[in-house]
Image: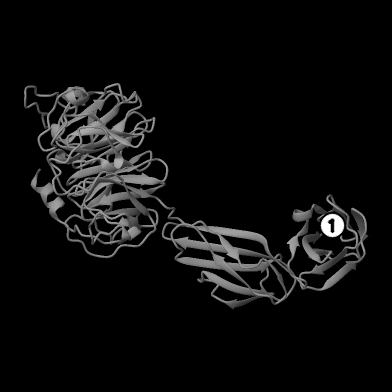
Amino acid sequence: MNLKQFYTLAFTTVLGSALLQAQTVTTFAGKENTIDPWTNFNNVTTDLADAYFYEPEGIAWDANGVMYITERNKVRIVQGGKVYNRSGDLGDGTKSHGYLNGTGVAGSYFRPTSLAPMSSGDMLIVDCENHALRKLSAFVNIGNGQVVSTFAGANPSGGIDSRGTAGHVDASGAQARFDSPKGIVADGKGNFYVCDDLNFVIRKVTSNGAVTTIAGQAGSDGSVDASSGAASRFGGPYGIAMYDANHVVVTDNWNSSIRKVNITTGATTTICGKYGENWYKDGSLTEARFVSPKGIVVVDGLIYVADQSCIRVIDEVNKTVSTFAGNGASAGNTDGNGQNARFGRLAGLAFDGNNALYATDVYFNVIRKITIDNLSPTADFSATKTSLQIDEETTITDISGGKPATQRKWTVVDLSGSNSNVTLVSGDLNSSKDITVKFKATGFYSVKLEVTNEYGNDVEDKNSFINVSRTGSVRKYNALTGVTVYPNPSSGTSLNLKNTHSSFSGASVSIYDLNGTLVFTENDLNGAQIHMELPGLSKGIYMLVLEQNGESGAHRLVIQ
């Protein structure tokens, strides 16, 4: 471990406060193991809850959904609620390192970190201290062993103490050289991008094993944004994820920052964080600070970062950084929601493609699962009553999903778009979660809610959401009992009613304008189909109320 890595791991003082969010954190696999991880290890298949890990770091899934986990110094898979050793020397993680190609436990690694699936079904593994990329053959079933081979980087040196060879060479396969590579990501087109930590560069690796440098300069560390890869500088690139089709995002661990790299030109920019200021702080992109950013994933445009004892979420569009789960000022191993959960020292971070992140905790030696709740708002509302009489009150409540709104706007109008007959009893149309309203006239009233938070905005507009009549308990009659009104729109001279379920026997019809004025009525209807002559109603929107057997139903009527 070099001096930079030591200081990064050792620096645990954090400042600032985290934003509470309702993300559910649970322990997915592993027994807390801080006292003696050197002898508490599993050589046999075990249940998820009974597994002992030693510095687990990378997580990935193959095309069939098989989960792979790297640790010192082996690779395991999760199948059917159990953890299986698949590749690497068994035993004490401090003594099991090596560099041998072979099947199952005949192969060996030296601190494998991250991994990425290949289109062939094989898994590409970053073998950090062997300075190589290893290929593990595709999983077939538990009974079939998987073979590890060298994909890029120097072949094993051979002998009892076989090792890899560090360096920086752009070449193919075994002729290429890396120096303590860390993170890897696949672009979906057969290429891979690798954080070459101690070379301070970002490498591209093709499906054939051809290695090139796209950003940074080997042997030259720093924190420099530039329009070309050759002029860009990194301090210790660690984790990497695809941001979009043209960019990767990188955790620059030593520089305590998050960088964005164009995969074609190598142009590099700093999204947030700052060299020399490795403490914890949420806020805008310019204000936010990171302690020790490592694992990184992108989900729906949001960047999630494993930062020491918490997971941060970066919204580049809205220029914010907040704490997604855990607490940057307090470490531990506690399941819970949002900031109530605790992590020890996080390393790897992976997304399962559904609704959860998985994080590896190298201090407590466990795998944690973090459910992603929707952060952007999804506007919605409900009301205590939607069928009212004149001057009867109803309370409308914001029940939007996502993170709570920071801004809110209500609009309540009649079908002409006017709010002149709407009385606000309590609440603020421009901020309140709950508003109470009443109405001066009969008619249909529409309600619209606009909500905004730092992750986006949304609008819900419910047309004719509230019905106001002189009798109350109004329903859209045709939707409930098969009554249709036609033609609608009407010329205002005639109208037909049809009941497909029963007769209109004894029913009465009343038509009101939007001011609540009765403009037409007809009583003692009979039969399943009624024709009515109207008194030449003016153009506009009216409410037709049908009353029968003590019930009232309303229907919107348009005269044009």
Q: Nearer the viewer, residue 259 or 180?
A: 180
Task: Note whether 67 is above or below 272 in the view shown.
Answer: above
Q: Nearer the viewer, residue 123 or 51?
A: 51
Residue at image point 28% right, 65% down: 17
Q: Secondary structure at mark 1?
A: loop
| Residue 360 at x, y percent in the picture | 26, 45
Question: Is residue 226 in view from this perspective?
Answer: no
Task: Note whether 424 is above or below 314 in the view shown.
Answer: below
| Residue 234 at x, y percent in the picture | 19, 45
| Residue 364 at x, y percent in the picture | 21, 49
What is the quadrant of residue 523 in the picture? bottom right
Q: Residue furthest left?
A: 160
Task: Note whether 524 is above or below 436 in the view shown.
Answer: above
In the rendered image, the quadrant that contains the C terminus is bottom right
Give the residue number, with chain letter if any, for mark 1.
Answer: 490
In the rendered image, the quadrant that contains the N terminus is top left
| Residue 323 at x, y percent in the picture | 32, 58
Question: Is residue 427 in view from this perspective?
Answer: yes
Residue at image point 25% right, 65% down: 16
Q: Amino acid at mark 1?
A: Ser
Q: Describe residue 478's horizontal placement relative to residue 260 as left or right.
A: right
The crowd level at tag 1 (other Cα within 10 Å; few <14, some 14-19, many 20+) is: some
Q: Describe residue 66's horizontal placement relative to residue 431 as left or right.
A: left
Colouring mode (rainbow / by chain / secondary structure / one colour): one colour
Residue at image point 34% right, 26% down: 121
Q: Nearer the viewer, residue 216 or 526?
A: 526
